[in-house]
């Protein structure tokens, strides 16, 4: 009995530990994410973001992705959105201002990205957005570093 309790508490401890170094988010056939803000634990050397498109629309028509940047770099990064770069690139070139980026996915699709959260600072303002052309107006929010 006591042994089981220890096992159970270890299990809860480890699952919390795991949960704190990843987050899940989704979007659908509307111009919004299911989360208003993201919380990232800066003690995680590997922080994973799992993203799912729960709608029906194709990636080319109404795809989504997740991009994380410092707020001060948002204008610069969004000005480089270009469909010619392709879905896998998230319609963005490789830029040092991009902290994390997934490819564009359509309905039923899943993607993920892993970042070294220890490089993020609590003193800097970050944000996330979707880089499908025209989506960032409605699909964005703050990223809080814990
Ligand atoms: Cu989008």
Image: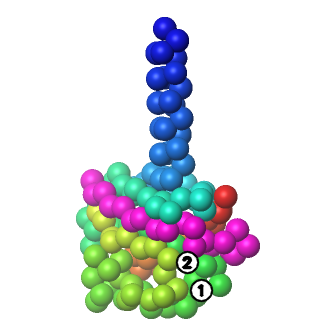
Q: Residue furthest front?
A: 3
Q: Quadrant of the C terminus?
A: bottom right
Q: Magenta stretch?
A: 107-126
Q: Position of residue 56 (x, y in %)?
A: 28, 55
Can residue 126 be seen here?
A: yes
Q: Residue furthest right?
A: 123
Mark 2 lies on a secondary structure that is: strand
Q: Is residue 35 shown above or below 79?
A: above
Separation of disc 2 and disc 1 at Cα? 6 Å
Q: Which residue is denoted by mark 1 in the rendering? A: 73
Q: Is residue 22 shown above or below 143?
A: above
Q: Position of residue 44 (x, y in %)?
A: 54, 59
Q: Which residue is denoted by mark 2 in the rendering? A: 69
Q: Which residue appears at 49% of the width and 68% of the height?
A: 116
The answer to if 95 sits in the magenta stretch is no
Mark 1 lies on a secondary structure that is: helix
Q: Is residue 131 left or right of residue 37?
A: left
Residue toward you, 77 or 107: 77
The answer to if 115 sits in the magenta stretch is yes
Q: Position of residue 33 (x, y in %)?
A: 49, 58
Q: Is residue 73 left or right of residue 108?
A: right
Pointer 2 and pointer 1: residues touching (CB < 8 Å)? Answer: yes
Q: Is mark 2 within 8 Å of ligand 1?
A: no
Residue toward you, 6 or 59: 6
Q: Which residue appears at 36% of the width and 77% of the height?
A: 90
Can residue 139 be seen here?
A: no
Dividing the picture into quadrants, the one containing residue 40 is bottom right
Q: Which residue appears at 59% of the width and 59% of the height?
A: 43
Q: Position of residue 143 (x, y in %)?
A: 61, 65
Specify the label residue 52 is tagged with. none
Q: How would you rate the neighbour count of disc 1 (Cα within 10 Å): few for under 14, some for 14-19, many for 20 or more?
A: few
């Amino acid at each position: 009995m006591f042994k089981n309790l220890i096992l159970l508490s270890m299990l809860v401890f480890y699952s919390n530990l795991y949960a704190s170094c990843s987050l899940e988010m989704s979007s659908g056939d509307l111009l919004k994410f299911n989360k208003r803000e993201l919380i990232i634990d800066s003690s995680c050397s590997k922080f994973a973001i799992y993203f799912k498109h729960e709608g029906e629309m194709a990636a080319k028509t109404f795809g989504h992705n997740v991009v994380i940047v410092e707020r001060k770099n948002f204008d610069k990064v969004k000005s480089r959105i270009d469909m010619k770069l392709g879905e896998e690139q998230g319609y963005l070139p490789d830029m040092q201002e991009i902290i994390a980026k997934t490819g564009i996915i359509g309905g039923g699709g899943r993607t993920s990205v892993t970042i070294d959260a220890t490089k993020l600072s609590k003193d800097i303002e970050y944000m996330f957005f979707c880089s499908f052309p025209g989506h960032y107006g409605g699909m964005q929010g703050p990223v809080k570093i814990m």
